[in-house]
Amino acid sequence: MTRVAPGNRFTPGDWAAALAVALLWGGNVVAVKAAVATLPPFLLAGMRFSLVALALVPFVRPRRDQLGAILALSVVLGIGHFGLLFVAVGGMDSASAGIAVQLSTPFSALVAWLAYGEALGWARGIGMAVAFAGVALLAGEPHLTSLTPLLFMVACTLAWAVSNVMIKRIGPINPLAINGGMALFAAPMLLGISAATEHDQWAAVMATTPAGWSGLAYTTIGSTLIAYTLWYRLVARHSLNRVVPFTLLGPGVALLGGVWLLGEPLTWHKLVGAALTVAGVAVIQLLLPRRADTKQDQTA
């Protein structure tokens, strides 16, 4: 199991990597929204991981003893996070999705409490309540025609929180090997789900515009090959509570991208929901118990 030094500090390279990840992931929901305009979500996710596997598996592979953990990760992160994320984005606008995906932070705090015994405290409890209230406000968003996409978003953020603990427990491994191995396992599962639950896939592929293909390219290269590789390295070097705060930039990127690039309406539900969610997440991340954070570093 990887051990991270309690006093490990962010280097300039770590800062640059964390900021790049936040920006790439913030723009990812905009890219996915452009792609799911024609491509069914599970098909899109399967195509994404197929491309990632083709790009990485011939060059970097995990050890045989790590395959079981990566297979489990492919179910939680590949299907539970990405599959459900793409379904959720298909049913809501990218700005709302970029706000709701921030639930990954309160869920990460809860998972860290369960996995590492990290103290929560009353302040972080309030932060969680505020963050959930901000996302709950999106349920009243007039352009959200069903609560189902929002529920899928809640489920996918919980899967993301669990996956980070799973990544830390794999031990020392090349981040590209995680990406490639997970993609190799996740791609056929997602394509199988698409075959069982979605229809007219070939017609959807033929109808996809350059904007849709650009969205697929972005979510494959930017969000996966680049962002997740950087993220795995950060998670391996630092505690979750030190790296997750950078995702606070995501809602702003998604909100601006959705409004400016996709022409999505800017409503008070989004503005207030974003403010509450980011404020709650900030409280969770900035008011950390010092001992708890150190304990996680030593046992991760």
Image (cartoon, rainbow, N blue to C red):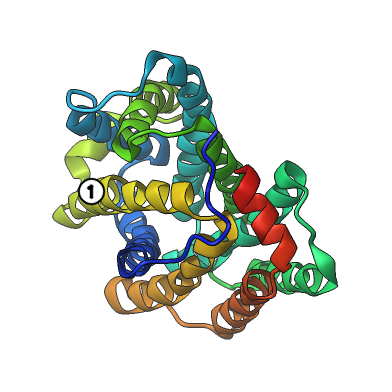
Q: Is residue 158 visible?
A: no
Location of residue 229 with respect to 103 vertically, above or below:
above
Q: Is residue 133 left or right of residue 246?
A: right
Name the quadrant of the C terminus.
top right
Q: Is residue 299 left or right of residue 228?
A: right
Q: Residue at x 27, y 51 (%)?
A: 226
Q: Position of residue 9 (x, y in %)?
A: 46, 65
User: In front: 73, or 37?
Assistant: 73
Q: Position of residue 80 (x, y in %)?
A: 54, 37
Residue that sits furthest to the top in the current view: 64
Location of residue 58 with respect to 275 vertically, above or below:
above
Q: Residue at x 50, y 18 (%)?
A: 68
Q: Is residue 157 visible?
A: yes
Element carrying mark 1: helix
Location of residue 104 with respect to 115 vertically, above or below:
below
Q: Which residue is mark 1?
A: 221
What is the quadrant of residue 140 in the picture?
bottom right
Q: Is residue 100 left or right of residue 95?
A: right
Q: Position of residue 214 (x, y in %)?
A: 19, 54
Classed neighbour count for the residue bearing mark 1: other residues with Cα under 10 Å, few (<14), some (14–19), many (≥20): some
Location of residue 44 with respect to 293 vertically, above or below:
above
User: In front: 283, or 27?
Assistant: 283
